[in-house]
Amino acid sequence: MEWEIVIGLEVHVQLSTKSKLFSGASTRFGSEPNTQACAVDLAMPGTLPVPNEEAFRYAVMFGLAMQARIGKRSVFERKNYFYPDLPKGYQTTQLNQPIVGAGEVEIYLADGGNKTVRLHHAHLEEDAGKSLHEDFHGMTGIDLNRAGTPLIEIVSEPDMRSATEAVAFLKKIHSVVTYLGISDGDMSQGSMRCDANVSLRPKGETELGTRTELKNINSFRFVERAIRAEAERQIDILEDGGNIVQETRLYDVDKDETRSLRSKEVANDYRYFPCPDLLPVILSDDYIEQLRVQLPELPDAKAARFQSEYSLSTYDANLLTQERATADYFETVSRACNAPKLAANWITGEISALLKRQEITISQSPVSPQQLASLIVRIKDNTLSSKIAKRVFEAMTKSADMADEIIQKHGYTQVSDSRALEKMVDEVIATNSTQVENYRKADEAKRPKMMGYFVGRIMKASSGQANPQMLNKILKEKLDALL
């Protein structure tokens, strides 16, 4: 039987406020455990929460970016459950009247297509603490620094049909929140986490199957792997005649499998009720409109501008605008060298490979935009061949020198003197009589490929510095003269 996978995501994004959602405690990352949890965060007797206006502003900005309905009246509820890192026994969140209502997210796929994923809603809530299962002699330590940190939980409709689509959705959310500046999106620090709801149904059917929830996945790669592993597990069960149990599962990275955590709760289990300590939050039309006009240029708009202003392909424009830092890097390079296509090629090629090798972001790139622009200028004016340009680029990764300084230091100037090139061609023809004779006897269709032998010898002799366009022209003229 052919199965269709159905995926919905719940994305938890930590907002970049300096203080927590209902208290003045710091949200700074990396502090000593339990040094940033105050009495309000723990709901100690006699304390009252006070909403953080900045968190509301960030949530509204996100909703506007998603073309979503903004909840002018939003209400906080208490979600009651016991967990070791939630000592007050409930989480303050939103259920029936969230800050952000229905919207749409446009995702772009590797095959060049695009798809609209519906946004069900996004709501504000406080984070819980963190359980630490390491170096405690078999015990678990609790760090409450994160308790009360403001989150926006973004809930999609079950519109995705592959792990690839789910990752594209997650990357789009990451792109938007970082463009807006409402979150750093650092998944390694827990600033962005994802729960994936996965179910299967026979191809062609419309009724949803029983879903499982994969909890707290913190990287794009692991989201893709976890969904695929869970889909394979469910297929095996269904094809053996079994039934899927609705439950929460964890993804084991080392074993590449999911394992059961607990039976899946439903809303009734949490005994939601309006928080008696917090009044409904009312937003005016003027407040919302002020935020709308302050929105920065977002990824889709920037990609469209890159296509029109820089004549980039849809693929390149979308690739370069996924992250704001990459888009800014590209524009700096492009404007400095006036060669946007070359800039795009180098950033998506050599720069991207460098960042991947060193496991760093483009903001940490050892090659600055100004350095790359200076290199591209010398490629444009034929000072450098593509091969020598890569040597100059490699030198840039180890110093702050510009292209001209590296070229002068290493003698990397491309040989474009026609007399010097003619001399090289004459020498290689004179010392390779057998290959010249083979060229003369070959069919016309085979001769261009046979020229590669001579080009290779000359490029080696010139340490790769011969101008390839001029070399090919001179070589062909001299070989054809021997026919």
Image (cartoon, grey):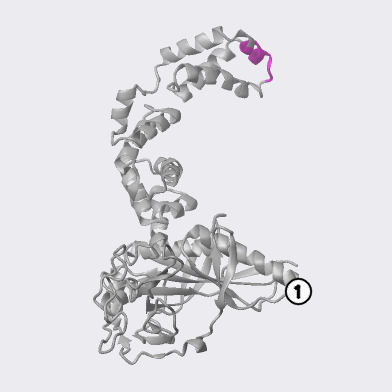
Q: Is residue 455 left or right of residue 323?
A: right
Q: Is residue 143 above or below residue 390?
A: below
Query: In which quarter of the view is residue 386 placed?
Result: top left
Q: Which residues are magenta?
A: 435-443
| CA neighbours of label 1 inside 10 A, class few (<14), some (14 to 19), many (20+) | few
Percent across and percent down for residue 186 are 38, 61
- As for residue 441 lying within the magenta part, the answer is yes
Name the residue that disc number 1 marks. 241
Query: In which quarter of the view is residue 204 placed?
Result: bottom right
Q: Nearer the viewer, residue 204 or 243?
A: 243
Give the position of the C terminus as an image quadrant. top right
Amino acid type of the residue tagged 1 in the rendering: Gly
Q: Is residue 224 left or right of residue 49?
A: right
Disc 1 secondary structure class: loop
Query: In which quarter of the view is residue 444 placed?
Result: top right
- As for residue 343 lying within the magenta part, the answer is no
Q: Is residue 362 above or below residue 160?
A: above
State the residue at coordinates (55%, 65%): 251
Q: Nearer the viewer, residue 265 or 316?
A: 265
Give the position of the N terminus as an image quadrant. bottom right
